[in-house]
């Protein structure tokens, strides 16, 4: 089954790359629950590493600069495997699942870029809670690059419009858009 999946994705990528070279390719596979990966890091290395490495080789040959993996849940134990496989971006990095991209940057340097990482619960609270969360994450990572700040998943309905506008305005100020 894994072999078929590897070949299928590889064939789709080859067809796409014959027409254009994207700025990024996202692999979407929710590999984690709130506290752990869906399969162990050892199984990830055994069963998924070959797929990641084959796809990475193909994408690098076509000069795709960003190979990203989108996974919900706690990905801290998977990031070293992804880095080894050539994946260089992770998202959405849910804070409720104990992901801390500031700590990941300290541990792995710029070998991994990040998207998201701002706690949606703090955005929902608004005010000082939102500002503290944004300031905890955005300035240190933005200075180093390899980071697109954002809500740590889809924006849930408990984030009010005024809180979302305040959050977006603060991000715009920190990133130089305002």
Image (cartoon, rainbow, N blue to C red):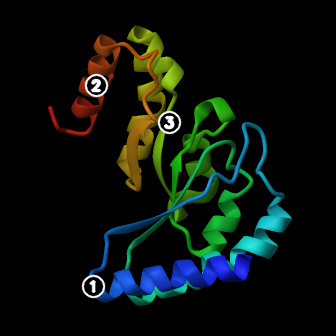
Q: Nearer the viewer, mark 2 or mark 1?
A: 1
Mark earlier in primary sequence (1, 3): 1
Closer mark to the observer between disc 1 and disc 3: 1
**Residue 56 shown left or right of residue 48 in the figure:** left
Q: Is residue 45 left or right of residue 171?
A: right
Residue 6 lies, in percent from the top left, at 63, 80
Earlier sequence position, callout 3 versus callout 2: 3
Element class at badge 2:
helix
Among the two numbered marks 2 and 1 on one chain, the one whose residue lies closer to the N terminus: 1
Tell whether 102 sits left or right of 26.
Answer: right
Residue 96's spot in the image, x, y percent?
64, 29
The image position of residue 129, as x and y in percent, is: 47, 13
- C-alpha separation, residue under disc 1 versus residue under disc 3: 32 Å
Residue under numbered circle 3 = 152
The 10 Å Cα crowd at callout 2, few under 14, some 14 to 19, many 20 or more, is: some
**In the rendered image, which residue does mark 1 sit on?**
19
Q: How many circles with numbers are drawn on the protein? A: 3
- State if disc 3 and disc 1 touch (CB < 8 Å): no
Residue appearing at x 23%, y 33% in the figure: 172
* Cα distance between the residues tagged 3 and 2: 16 Å
- The residue that mark 2 highlights is 170
Residue 127 x %, y %: 39, 9
Q: Residue at x 36, y 80 (%)?
A: 16
In this rendering, does residue 59 appear at all?
Answer: no
In the displayed structure, would residue 61 be above or below residue 135? below
For the C terminus, the quadrant is top left
Is 78 placed above or below 67 here?
Answer: above
Label pair 3/2, CB-CB below 8 angstroms: no
């Amino acid at each position: 089954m894994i072999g078929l999946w590897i070949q299928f994705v590889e064939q789709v990528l080859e067809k796409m790359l014959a027409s254009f070279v994207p700025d990024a390719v996202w692999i979407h596979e929710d590999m984690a629950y709130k506290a752990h990966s869906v399969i162990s890091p050892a199984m990830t290395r055994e069963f998924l590493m070959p797929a990641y490495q084959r796809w990475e080789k193909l994408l690098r040959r076509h000069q795709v600069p960003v190979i990203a993996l989108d996974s919900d849940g706690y990905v801290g134990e998977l990031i070293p495997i992804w880095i080894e496989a050539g994946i260089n971006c992770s998202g959405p990095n849910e804070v409720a699942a104990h992901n801390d991209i500031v700590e990941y940057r300290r541990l792995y340097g710029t070998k991994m870029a990040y998207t998201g990482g701002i706690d949606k619960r703090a955005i929902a609270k608004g005010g000082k809670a939102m500002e503290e969360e944004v300031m905890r994450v955005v300035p240190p990572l933005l200075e180093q690059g390899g980071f697109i700040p954002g809500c740590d998943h889809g924006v849930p309905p408990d984030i009010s419009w005024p809180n979302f506008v305040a959050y977006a305005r603060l991000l715009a100020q920190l990133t130089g858009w305002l």
